[in-house]
Image (tube, helix red, strand yellow):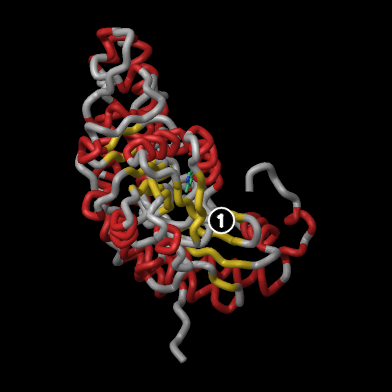
Amino acid sequence: MTTPITRDDCAARDAADPLAPFRDEFVLPDGIVYLDGNSLGALPRATPARVAELVEREWGQRLIASWNDAGWWDKPRTLGAMLAPLVGAAADEVVVGDGTSANLFKTLVAALRLNPDRRVVVGEAGNFPTDLYVTQGVVELFDGASVRPADVDGGGLAAALEPGDVAVVLLSHVDYRTGALRDMAAVTELAHAHGALVVWDLCHSVGALPVALSQAGADFAVGCTYKYLNAGPGAPAFTYVARRHHDRARQPLSGWHGHARPFDFADDYEPAQGASRFLSGSQPLVAAAALEASLDLWARVDMERVRAKSLALTDLFLELTAPAGLECATPLEHARRGSQVSLRHPDGYPMVQALIARGVVGDFRAPDILRFGFAPLYLRYVDVHDAATALVEVVESGEWRDPRHARRAQVT
Ligand SMILES: *Cc1c(COP(=O)(O)O)cnc(C)c1O
């Protein structure tokens, strides 16, 4: 038997960690191990000053001049260009704006219009609710359109594509519940071989691992910036449009920010060139300033290092929590794992609450998933050690049975 990893071993790994200096760039409350950065990322220290600058100087002093002088009008494009390397895209293929749900709507409709002879949208059974609900809303708008759910990790995608009637496939790159990572290049190729386009949802992969949209030949992608990218609650989302679709893609929320010449104030819509045509209206620029501060930080990050540390952290957590005896829902194979560990137990909710009471913050996803996200920029190996130790103690002691841990809050 190998000797168990000690807290000292973990401290030594922290001392040798090339990403360790990034931890100081985040605000992290004392006494907490934060394993929920996959739901709401931690606050970068630089963010409050950047937001204050926008409010006090750009807005307060410069007023309307900031649309030109502070680059407000072009923010969706300049932030998109900053984000592009994180998703393996060219600068002009990404725009920032609106929310993930709205961008799902725009890209799904655009994909259906690009593939007009087909009316089936393949979605994933068990995908994040908004992906399912927006898909259901989109097919209601197209005569004869329908949704065909596929069990992606169970190998059901090929059969769903087989009839040759699929216009578009919408998939999460990393499953929000299990943390399963999908092979973007292989799935995209399979869909294309069957004449279907693909929309990738990157909510749980952007900032968590290297993403290579262009290399995979992806058509469209969307994702949020408040999870692994640390841009703050409700931060603007992004849309990727492959350059080969720039001239023909038409999205339905054809507002003036997506017009070819918005300051002509013409009566008729004419889409802008490139990914800009996926913009609609004015954006929350105060929130965009917070995203800008995050992206400045992310520009200095080596994603290969993030991936290596993420896998090391999740391996460590899996090893140290094994004595708790909970079933693991996350693939053990590195190539199929995102940056989270999901464990299953019917009493997962009170177990997570008992852990939070000890300062270890994870979350619960119905019906039975205890979910722990690992953000390599601000988590240390010793944090993982402490969290795993707490989990084993909570399960073995039965302290989660205290009735106060069973009370459900509005947000789980
Ligand atoms: C978090 C998440 C979303 C969020 O959508 P919003 O419009 O930002 O609320 C969408 N899809 C997936 C897969 C997610 O994990």
Residue marked by disc 1: 362
Please tell me which residue is depicted at 35% across the width and 70% down the height of the picture: 12
Visible residue check, residue 330:
yes
Q: Is residue 19 visible?
A: no
* Residue 239: x %, y % from top left: 34, 37
Up-down: is 290 above or below 65? below
Rendering quarter of residue 64? top left
Percent of width and height locating residue 338 = 41, 61
Tell me where residue 245 sits by quadrant: top left
Residue sitting nearer the eye, 406 or 397: 406
With 353 as the anchor, is 50 left or right in this view? left
Between 13 and 221, the residue placed more toward the observer is 221
Q: Secondary structure at mark 1?
A: loop
Is residue 84 positioned above or below 177 on the image?
above
Q: Position of residue 275 (x, y in %)?
A: 27, 32
Horizontal arrangement in the rendering, residue 331 relative to residue 392 (left or right): left
Q: Residue at x 52, y 49 (%)?
A: 128
Which residue is at the front of the view, 113 or 187?
A: 113
